[in-house]
Image: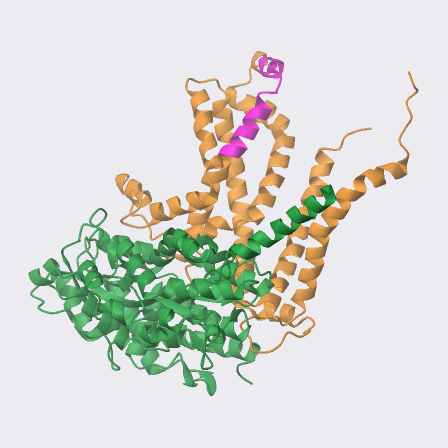
Chain colours: A green, B orange
Amino acid sequence: MLRRILALLLCTALVIPVMSQSDDKPYEGTSLNFLYLATAFTNGLKELEPEFEELTGISVEFELLDEEGSVRKTQLELASGAGNYDVVGIQSGNIPLYAENGWVTPVETFWGTDVSDPEALDHGDLIASTMNAMAWDGVQQCLPFFAATIIMYYQIDIFEAAGIESPPTTYDELLEIAPLVHTDEAPLIALRGNPPAAHGNIWHFNSFFHGEGAKFFVDFPNDLTPTVNSPEAIRALTNFVTLKNNYGPEGVAAYQYPDVTRAMQQGTVVVVMEGAPLAGRILDPEESKVAGNLGFAVVPGGAAGPKPSFAAHGICVTADSEHQEAAYTFLEWAMSFDTMKKIALAQPHIAVTRDSLWEDEDFIAKYDYDYGGGSFLKAFQDSLAAAPADYYPPFAGWPLMGDILGQAVQEAEIGARTPEDALNHANELITQMLEDEGYLP
Amino acid sequence: MAAYQPIPQRAYYKYLSPSIIVLLLLTVLPVLFTLYLSTSSLSFASPRPERFIGLRNYSRLLDDSRFLQSIPVSALFIVAPVALQLVLGFIVAVIMNERLPGMRWLRYVLVAPMVIPPIVTGLTWRVMFTPKLGSVNYFLSLIGLDGPSWLTDANWALTAIVIVAVWGWTPFVALMFLAAMQSFPDELYEAAVIDGATWVQSVRHVTLPLLKPTVTFIGILRTMEALGIFPIIYIVTAGGPAAATETVNFYAYVSGFSYLKVGYASAIIVVFFFMLLLIIGPTMRFLLRNFQVDD
């Protein structure tokens, strides 16, 4: 009798969890691990996680790191195939690397299956350029949550005092006004200096590079013979170095983005070309001395017009995750209009990737800064429209190539080589690298 | 009471075997695997599949100017900080040993750099070295000096790293020297005074000879620590400007984790390993000679 009772209890214990997984919560009890950079969006996701858990029964553990650390750890984890993380974040420049190595499950594979809810995701509403940046070989790999570009921030009162009526639209104009506003106390311009390719000086220099109409290769992706020492590229680097060395703060060649942001916040420079998503920080009234005195504009351009930086950040399901469907369910929820809007309103998450959110009244009311120097949101949108989709050439060798180029830019800045020598040297090193890695015969 | 039974020699090996096995798993196997990787073309940035390429990674190192530049930088970051730490640590210890007022508090203060995480140390110094914003050039200006651009000039960036390393570890060296000095018998100093020795002569002829084993030990300890210098470079200069402050292990990190050239990074690490052996071997022999215990 006792045995029967025990057997009955055991069966009941086994059945209860199964019964508790109702049809609308098929993955209840699943626990996901999320790894990425701490951004306004990912911080917001972490705060909203209890809502997701209540909705689906799936819990999510967040591990949010600094930029360099998150990229390195993610790559190490994915390369090891350990399957410790179900969802990871990604910068668009790494899409080829992750896709070619099979580290992520393309989100397209879930579309049309039971797990997908096309209305909730509404991927047609996601900004096309950011969706393209998250695709590889015509297949959607990940979903974009962050549309990054740079805009020009400038101090309105200093421009007005110098009689400058509108912000410069070309490098020549910028160099013309430089002597009018530049002083030792408040130099004209701060731009990033250290080389790490993803978020260092290349984030800015490529804008000058594309702006002069320079090309990285003879004919990407058919002929990857590098052309980073073309006359256009040399002109771009000369302008970049002239601006920073003649009109930048001392030590600007080692500036990282917090240094640039801090310089603008403190009003110790007149102009910065920095991430539009950093506006919340630059204008934070508790930390900024220039809040209320900044104008916003698309960055200047060269012979090819303005080419602001462009990168998207996204989230992906890892290929080694044991919870593929649950992880995709989380992606859909995270990328839904409601979640993105909640985060945009609760956090300083300006760089949203939904067209409809850019037109949302609440969103516009929160973010449309205008202090007499033009609308922030207009400058942001115009910059996104002008940003080249191939800002970073989409191939797995870019991290190394970008770093070689970044080193050359810094060499020119500190006077170790002339711009021409630096780019000739970089072109040789890149050629060697491309041969070594099998991109060139 | 039972008579003492010596444990048979074989039993020692039996008792030690678990720790030896763990040690082998954690040290020898990774080294062997790194050796294997160093002969492969493994690179996540390459479209080619991984293949055995023999010693090609090593031969490339000989033509890699960035790698060759990192060797003297590594040497500089070992020799300069350790030498300065020993000299400054000795001076500080001698002063602290003089039982002057406030020395107890100075000891507490000296502990601070040792307990601050290297990341915090690096970030703080990075801001301090920044011209205009930082305090280093401000203090230099107070004595009429025009501070350099620390992080954008190759030579000054190297100097900056040495300064941070010296700041971080001189207190440790001083406290170790102080602990040793306080164990020296007072009679020797009294005898020196009776013989008419000045304070400087006492330090020269009594303190320094007695301190020799400690200097040797601390020197070796700091040398081995200095070989692993990484977080300070990572935070303060990120290896720049233009790779001027990259050490061999920093370049291995960049090659492996930024460029994803795993095979090549492994070859750098193997070469670094043999460089360590070249340094540690003679220093260990020196240590054993100085600390030989008579049976």
- Residue B188, percent from left and from top: 62, 16
Q: Give the range drawn in magenta.
A: B171-192
Exactly how many numbered labels are in the figure?
A: 0
Residue drawn at x 47%, y 84% is A224
The reply to whether residue A349 is in sight is no
Residue B193 lies, in percent from the top left, at 56, 14
Front-most of residues A404 and A312:
A312
Quarter of the image holding residue A214?
bottom left
Residue B53 can be seen in this image: yes
B181 sits left or right of B143 in the view: right
> Could you say which is closer to the camera, residue A358 or residue A330?
A330
Q: Does the magenta stretch include residue B179?
A: yes
Query: Furthest-front residue in view?
Result: A1
Choose between A277 and A427: the one closer to the eye: A277
- Dividing the image into 4 quarters, which one contains the C terminus of chain A? bottom right
Residue drawn where x is 62% and y is 57% of the image: B272
- Give the x, y percent position of residue B256: 55, 63
Task: Give the quarter of the image for residue B237.
Answer: bottom left
Vertical placement of residue A257 versus A428, above or below = above
Q: In this view, does A116 lie to the left or right of A350?
A: right
> Can residue B183 be found in the magenta stretch?
yes
Q: Name the dominant secondary structure of the magenta segment.
A: helix
- Residue sitting at x 21%, y 57%: A269
Image quadrant where one finds the N terminus of chain A: top right
Q: Is residue A240 left or right of residue A117?
A: left
Q: Position of residue A34 (x, y in %)?
A: 47, 57
